[in-house]
Image (cartoon, coloured by chain):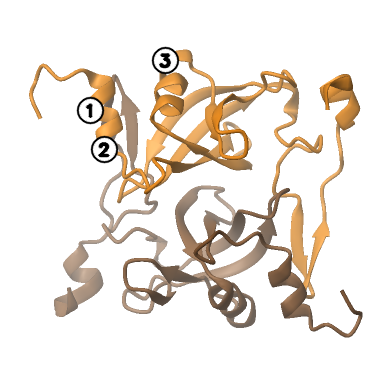
Chain colours: A orange, B brown
């Protein structure tokens, strides 16, 4: 690795991208410590997250970059980015605009808790999906 | 889904396993809210986690179940299991025995923070790897 190598390349090379060029990224809310969601990043998504200071993921269903909040306004401002010991998972500390991370209108995507063998919904909808997405969904 | 279906089957069927039969699982420390690690589970791993009350992952490198702490003693007692909105990520609330989740001897596996284009180690080693694993590594 040469000293002249751009920083962005260095940071990308430390990540162990999977066979599809992706790495899982966890978004944790700064302050509350609440885990809001897990999504995926490719190289472009991580670069965009770093340069724009907001969470940019790769949508596996749509096959393109997904600037979190581009439709809903529920942008995640990135306070910190961490990489794990073997380089195959990323942890973001974010400030969640609107207090809603989930497309269902809940604070966190992890709103189903295992209770007696059943996944039970344990978090309230804070904002109705039609209110979030209007007629575009 | 019949009413007579065993609970374990129901809970497994709600998970969207990937093409390799795996789902990412995030371990968060109960109390501190610190994200300790991310690993993978297959059906057997999730079933074992539920029935044994400790985190059991699937080791992709070894191709077998990995009872976290089986060598190190750094068992993760599971307080809660959550599933995300689209069923493709799991979040565990755990009590981390020994205060060390990472094989490097650190509290969390996410000990590298991005600073000026470089991943910088920002957490101390709490326990030396030779002390954790003895001569077995």
**Residue found at x 59% / y 69%:** B78
Badge 3: how crowded within 10 Å, few (<14), some, or many (20+)? few
Q: Position of residue A3 (x, y in %)?
A: 8, 21
**Residue found at x 39% / y 74%:** B69
Q: Quadrant of the N terminus of chain A?
A: top left
Badge 1: how crowded within 10 Å, few (<14), some, or many (20+)? some
Q: According to the image, label 1 marks what residue?
A: A10
Indicate which disc residue A14 carries. Answer: 2
Chain containing mark 2 = A
Label 2 SS? loop
Q: Position of residue A23 (x, y in %)?
A: 43, 43
Q: Position of residue B94 (x, y in %)?
A: 56, 63
Q: According to the image, label 3 marks what residue?
A: A51
Q: Earlier in the sequence, mark 1 or mark 3?
A: 1
Q: Quadrant of the C terminus of chain A?
A: top right
Q: Position of residue B15 (x, y in %)?
A: 67, 62
Going by the image, does B11 lie left or right of A75? Answer: right
Q: Are marks 1 and 3 on the same chain?
A: yes
Up the image or down, B116 lies above or below A128; here it is above
Chain containing mark 3 = A
Q: Are marks 1 and 3 in contact (CB under 8 Å)?
A: no
Chain containing mark 1 = A
Q: Earlier in the sequence, mark 2 or mark 3?
A: 2
Q: Are marks 2 and 1 in contact (CB under 8 Å)?
A: yes
């Amino acid at each position: 690795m040469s000293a002249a190598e751009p920083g962005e390349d260095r940071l990308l090379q430390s990540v162990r991208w999977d066979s599809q060029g992706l790495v899982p990224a966890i978004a944790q809310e700064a302050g509350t410590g609440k885990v809001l969601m897990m999504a995926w990043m490719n190289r472009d998504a991580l670069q965009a997250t770093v340069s724009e200071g907001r969470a940019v993921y790769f949508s596996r269903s749509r096959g393109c970059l997904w600037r979190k909040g581009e439709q809903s306004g529920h942008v995640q401002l990135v306070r910190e980015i961490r990489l794990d010991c073997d380089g195959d998972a990323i942890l973001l500390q974010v400030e969640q605009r609107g207090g809603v991370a989930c497309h269902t209108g809940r604070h966190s995507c992890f709103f189903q808790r295992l209770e007696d063998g059943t996944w039970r919904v344990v978090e309230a909808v804070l904002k109705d999906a039609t209110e979030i997405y209007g007629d575009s969904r």
